[in-house]
Amino acid sequence: MAKLPYTWSKVDRGDIISFVYETKEGRRLRRTILVLEPDRKKLLHGIQLEISNVATNRELKKLLEMAGKTEVVDENKKIYRVELDGSSKQIYQKLKRLIKRHDIYRTYSLKKAKKSQVFLEDLRLPPTFVKELVGED
């Protein structure tokens, strides 16, 4: 999987990032999220995008479309971001059914998250959706 090194100071709303996060049990797990709030009261708020949580790439496409306008960051590495359509609260309300169905809303301690390197993460999206994003017919 392709990813681009990034810095925590650049993380913004709509970025699709990955980082390693230590659970309460001490396990270190890689998390891939769509960032809703990069720093709100020392917490990172986002929607977890791991494939096991979002059942199909069709549902992932639906989630991204409902959140806002998906933009290409790096076409070759399949890296995207979302220009969020509204406040974090509005995005949550739009996505509420998907979020609850898959249990994918997460908050992370920013201090703990920053112990890990952060990357812009690639996504496997339906080929027709990718063609729409890059402007191919």
Image (cartoon, rainbow, N blue to C red):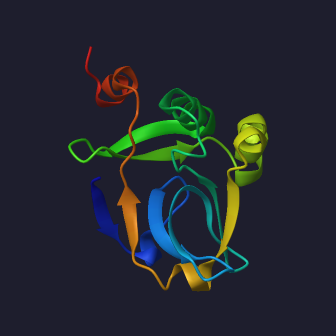
Left or right? Give the position of 107 relative to 113: right
Above-or-below relation of 58 to 33: above
Outermost residue on the left side: it is 76
- Quadrant the C terminus occupies: top left
For image coordinates 75% across by 38% down, the residue present is 101
State the image coordinates of residue 131 (x, y, percent, origin top left).
31, 24
Q: Residue at x 74, y 46 (%)?
A: 92
Left or right: where does residue 100 sit relative to residue 43? right
Would residue 19 appear left or right of 36 to someone viewing this image? Answer: left
User: Where's residue 77, x and y in %?
Assistant: 24, 48
> Is the residue 7 above or below the residue 54 in the image?
below
Give the image location of residue 58, x and y in percent.
52, 27
Closer to the camera in the image, 30 or 136: 30
Q: Tell me the quarter of the picture where residue 93 sits.
A: top right
The answer to whether residue 137 is above or below residue 112 is above
Residue 66, picture quadrant: top right
**Total label count?**
0
Looking at the image, which residue is at 61% across and 39% down? 67
- Residue drawn 20% across the image and 43% down it: 76
Query: Residue 110, percent across and down?
Result: 61, 79
Q: Which of the pair 90/104 is nearer the observer?
A: 104
The residue lying toward the viewer, choosing from 103 and 85, is 103
